[in-house]
C-alpha cells in the first residue's frame, strides 16, 4: 500500500506514519521538515506547500493520502494536485466543528458551524471538510478526533493533571459534578487512521474514547501518582474572578469547560467503535503520561495550566 502523508513530522503525524509503517505500508511524507524528521522507514520529500510546484515530486497514483492540515492555502492546492489520482483520502478534522456543545452523546449528524470566519479554528476545519467533500466525494474519510493525548503531547493539557498531582500540597480543581473527560490516545488514533485507510472506510467518524466522569478521572490520576493531598473544588465564577482560564493555555485549568460546552467531551463513540476504533484503558494512558511528565520535568514551563505560584495564590485567596 502506497501512502502519502501531507505532514508527518509533528506529534500526531509521526504517530500516523509509525502506525502505517508497522502495518507494512510504503510511506512518503511531504513536509518542510522544520518540526523534525520522519520516522525511520518513511521517505521525506521536503517542500513548502505554499510554493509553486510543491507537489511536483509526489504526483501520481496513491492508495491513500492523509491530510493533516486545515489551512485553506494548503488543503485546496493539495486537492487540486493530488485528488484525481488518490484511491482514498483521509482528512484529519476535529470534534470542535460542531455548532453546539451542550448535547451529551451527540453523533456525527449534529450540525456544524457555518465557516463565516476563517480565523476561527472550527470554521476553518469545516471549510477544509467541505472543500474535501466537494473534490473527493465517496473517496473521503473525515476523521474528527476529540482530545488527543499521550506521551509527548505538545499542548500540555492532559499531562497537566498527572504532572500536577506528582507534586505535594492541595490541588485546585473545578467543580466536577456534571463534567466529563473524553480522550483518544494518539497511538490508538493513528492505528485506526491507518486501518481505516486500508479498509477504504469513508464518511465522517468522531474518533473519540469513552466518556468518564471528571471526578473519576481525577481519582484515577490520584491513584496513578500516589497523590495524598487535598483536591480543592472551586466554583466556576470564583475561578473566573481570579483570572483562571478554561480548557488550555496559560493560567488555565486544563480540561475544565464552561457549563455550556461540557458536551465537547461527551460525543458519541459508536461510529468509531463500529469502524474498528479501540482505545486503551485510561489507567494505562495516565501511567504512560505520568512517566513522560516526570521525564520532561513536572515543574517545567508549560503551554497549559497554572504554575505552582499561580495555583498557590488562587488557593490562598479562595480558602
Image (spheres, rainbow, N blue to C red):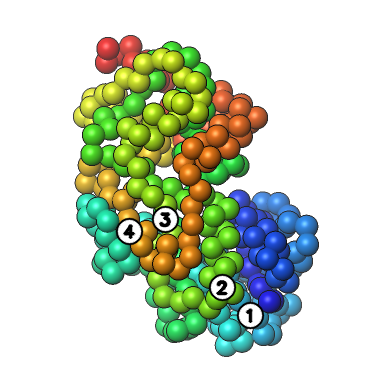
Q: Are marks 4 and 1 in contact (CB under 8 Å)?
A: no
N-term-proximal mark, 2 vs 4 = 2
Label 4 sits on a secondary structure element that is loop
Q: Which residue is mark 2?
A: 197
Marks 3 and 2, how far apart in space?
17 Å
N-term-proximal mark, 4 vs 3 = 3
Name the quadrant of the N terminus.
bottom right
Marks 4 and 1, how far apart in space?
29 Å
N-term-proximal mark, 4 vs 1 = 1
167 above or below 61?
above
101 above or below 23?
above
**Residue 158 locus on image (x, y percent):** 47, 39
N-term-proximal mark, 2 vs 1 = 1
Label 1 sits on a secondary structure element that is loop
Q: Nearer the viewer, mark 4 or mark 1?
A: 4
Would you call the spot at circle 3 few (<14 residues within 10 Å), some (14-19), or many (20 or more)?
many
Q: Are marks 2 and 1 in contact (CB under 8 Å)?
A: yes
Furthest toward the bottom, the residue is: 84
N-term-proximal mark, 3 vs 1 = 1
N-term-proximal mark, 3 vs 2 = 2
Q: Which residue is mark 3?
A: 208
Amino acid at each position: 500500500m502506497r501512502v502519502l502523508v501531507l505532514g508527518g513530522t509533528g506529534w500526531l503525524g509521526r504517530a500516523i506514519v509509525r502506525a502505517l509503517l508497522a502495518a507494512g505500508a510504503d510511506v512518503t511524507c511531504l513536509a518542510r521538515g522544520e518540526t523534525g524528521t520522519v520516522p525511520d522507514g518513511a521517505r521525506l520529500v521536503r517542500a513548502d506547500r505554499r510554493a509553486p510546484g510543491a507537489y511536483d515530486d509526489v504526483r501520481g497514483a496513491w492508495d491513500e493520502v492523509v491530510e493533516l492540515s486545515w489551512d485553506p492555502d494548503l488543503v485546496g492546492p493539495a486537492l487540486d494536485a493530488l485528488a484525481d489520482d488518490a484511491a482514498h483520502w483521509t482528512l484529519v478534522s476535529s470534534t470542535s466543528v460542531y455548532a453546539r456543545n451542550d448535547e451529551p452523546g451527540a453523533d456525527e449528524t449534529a450540525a456544524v458551524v457555518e465557516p463565516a470566519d476563517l480565523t476561527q479554528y472550527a470554521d476553518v476545519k469545516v471549510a477544509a471538510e467541505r472543500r474535501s467533500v466537494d473534490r473527493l466525494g465517496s473517496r473521503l474519510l473525515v476523521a474528527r478526533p476529540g482530545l488527543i493525548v499521550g506521551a509527548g503531547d505538545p499542548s500540555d493539557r492532559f499531562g497537566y493533571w498527572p504532572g500536577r498531582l506528582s507534586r505535594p500540597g492541595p490541588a485546585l480543581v473545578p467543580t466536577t459534578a456534571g463534567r466529563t473527560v473524553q480522550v483518544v490516545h494518539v497511538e490508538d488514533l493513528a492505528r485506526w487512521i491507518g486501518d481505516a485507510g486500508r479498509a477504504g472506510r469513508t464518511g465522517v467518524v468522531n474518533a473519540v474514547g469513552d466518556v468518564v466522569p471528571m471526578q473519576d478521572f481525577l481519582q484515577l490520576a490520584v491513584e496513578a501518582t500516589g497523590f495524598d493531598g487535598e483536591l480543592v473544588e472551586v466554583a466556576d465564577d470564583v475561578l473566573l474572578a481570579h483570572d483562571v482560564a478554561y480548557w488550555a493555555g496559560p493560567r488555565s485549568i486544563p480540561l475544565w469547560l464552561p457549563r455550556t460546552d461540557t458536551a465537547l467531551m461527551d460525543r458519541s463513540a459508536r461510529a468509531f467503535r463500529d469502524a474498528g476504533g479501540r482505545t486503551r484503558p485510561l489507567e494505562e494512558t495516565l501511567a504512560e503520561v505520568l512517566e513522560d511528565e516526570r521525564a520532561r520535568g513536572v515543574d517545567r514551563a508549560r503551554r497549559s495550566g497554572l504554575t505552582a505560584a499561580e495555583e498557590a495564590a488562587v488557593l490562598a485567596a479562595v480558602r
